[in-house]
Amino acid sequence: MSENDRILIFDTTLRDGEQSPGASMNLEEKLRIAQVLEDMGVDVIEAGFPIASEGDFEAVREVAKVVKNAIVCGLARATPNDIDRAAEALKPARRGRIHTFISTSPLHMKYKLQMEPDAVHQAVIDSVKRARKYTDDVEWSPEDGSRTEHDFLCRCVESAIAAGAATINIPDTVGYSIPEEFAALIEMLFNRVPNIDQAVISVHCHNDLGLAVANSLAALQVGARQVECTINGLGERAGNAALEEIVMALRTRRDLLAFDTAIKTEDIIKASRLVSGITGFAVQPNKAIVGANAFAHESGIHQDGVLKHAGTYEIMTPESVGLTQSNLVLGKHSGRHAFREKLTDLGYDLGDNAIQDAFKRFKDLADRKKEVFDEDIIALVDDEVVRGNDRIRMLELEILCGTAHTPPKAELVLEIDGERRACKGTGDGPVDAAFNCIKQLFPHEAGLQLFQVHAVTQGTDAQAEVTVRLEEHGKTVNGSGADTDTMVASVKAYLHALNKLLVKREKTAPGTLSA
Ligand code: KIV
Ligand code: ZN
């Protein structure tokens, strides 16, 4: 049993992370992420902001139903409606937390809230008390805390604790602080707030100056015991502190940071890939811990060193974050049993029918691709999972690439609500031609915001993983598709996004399902 202090990991990928423009997730995707977070051992999952929309409310409620171990948290402003709505959404939770917040900095109070400090202070007390009527587990945050006057911050924190907040979270909302300053702020609270020992002190740092992780670690060193973070550092503007960086810094530098977390670090890569795949936010290759190059050694001197002793250039092992050697898996002669075992190894728990479908697709892939790797299996199964009950499906696609004299042509056959429909089209490039065909067959106004291609493995026969982001009336959806043929993957990704948009439309304006 370790003597180290335990740090609570509060993940807000589903709330602050989803606030990144373009990172919207649907319910099924949020549930998949919540399950991975739960399996990974995060202590608190902030699942959404229930008053913000029906979708957010439903997400918090459904996450609350399935999560068994982690605390499920819902965000609420300091108003009765917000708090009541969060409490309602959290009803099914085994352990639910209401997180209520209000701005406390002079700038925010004057311009955003247009409230006097005394009124804000009263709202702190009232909101925490109201939340406490529903649960003992109430967290309170002074938004823009790092730019709040110290006397007023101490007054509000003391009152929030007196009103029943068990966690006080200090946000660096605009990512303005630097580590020494932020640590001093937390230390100041420990020194000046008389009842501070009755609450867990948490920190929530944004990354506008690239200091979110450094600020969070500095705060832990002076007594904060909960850290709010997101997978891949997703979040408003430049994002939040990255969970994987905090957790691996704590694990790797135990000599200086003598803390424990409950995180199963071997699940980090899986979580990172899932969040990146769902949101379409690619992870930069040199991103710490989860970037494709984070454990790659290119220079000869480094490679030589690593071969002689991994510790020469590796401060943590790839296995410790869940990176295994790219295993050459099954070939085209592999049987169903071996395939099923591979899926279990990769963490998939599929029903018989889904395994059957995945196996068929694996055989197709093995016919087209000499070597099938773990990454290929993951892309293939994820691709199958996301297609679910799509109304629009691709049946056939033929592309003719062109030069300046012969424009690229596409012939596309789709199944739309069970009806087979075909069309021919041209475009500025093959992808454009294929997308134009989709627009002819299913006219819609959504605009293309992102088209991104990434190779799942190496080699010219690698599967392409394509992400498409569509926007309609301010609502964005991300679609993904994988195939050894980049054009097929592109059409699949577009259709996936379009199908998601239709589900969204149906929820907001039932009966308007036609194009
Ligand atoms: O950044 C912030 O201040 C927040 C609060 C709601 C905690 O996200
Ligand atoms: Zn935030």
Image (cartoon, rainbow, N blue to C red):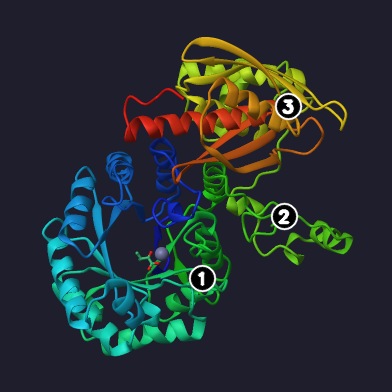
Residue 23 percent across, percent down from the top left: 49, 49
Amino acid at pointer 1: Ala
Residue holding disc 2: 293
- Foreground mark, 3 or 2, reads 3
- Sequence order check: which comes first, mark 3 or mark 1? 1
In this picture, is 200 found above or below 186? above
**Image coords of residue 260 (percent x, y):** 44, 65
The amino acid type, in three-letter code, at marker 2 is: Asn
Q: Nearer the viewer, mark 1 or mark 2?
A: 1
Q: Secondary structure at mark 3?
A: loop
Query: Three-letter amino acid code at disc 3?
Result: Asp
Decide: is 235 above or below 446: below
Looking at the rendering, in which quadrant would you find the N terminus? bottom left
Residue 329 seen: no
Residue 347, image x, y percentages: 52, 35
Using the image as rendered, state which of residue 377 and residue 317 is in the foreground: 377
According to the picture, the residue beneath numbered tag 1 turns out to be: 212
| Image marks 3 and 1: residues in contact by CB distance under 8 Å | no
Label 2 element class: loop
Residue, disc 3: 485
Q: Is residue 491 left or right of residue 147?
A: right
Residue sitting at 51 percent across and 65 percent down?
246
Q: Quadrant of ligand 2?
A: bottom left
Separation of disc 3 and disc 1 at Cα? 40 Å
- Comparing marks 3 and 1, which lies closer to the viewer? 3
Asked if the residues shown at circle 1 and circle 2 are in contact, with their CB atoms under 8 angstroms apart, the answer is no
| Nearer-the-camera pick, 90 or 4 | 90
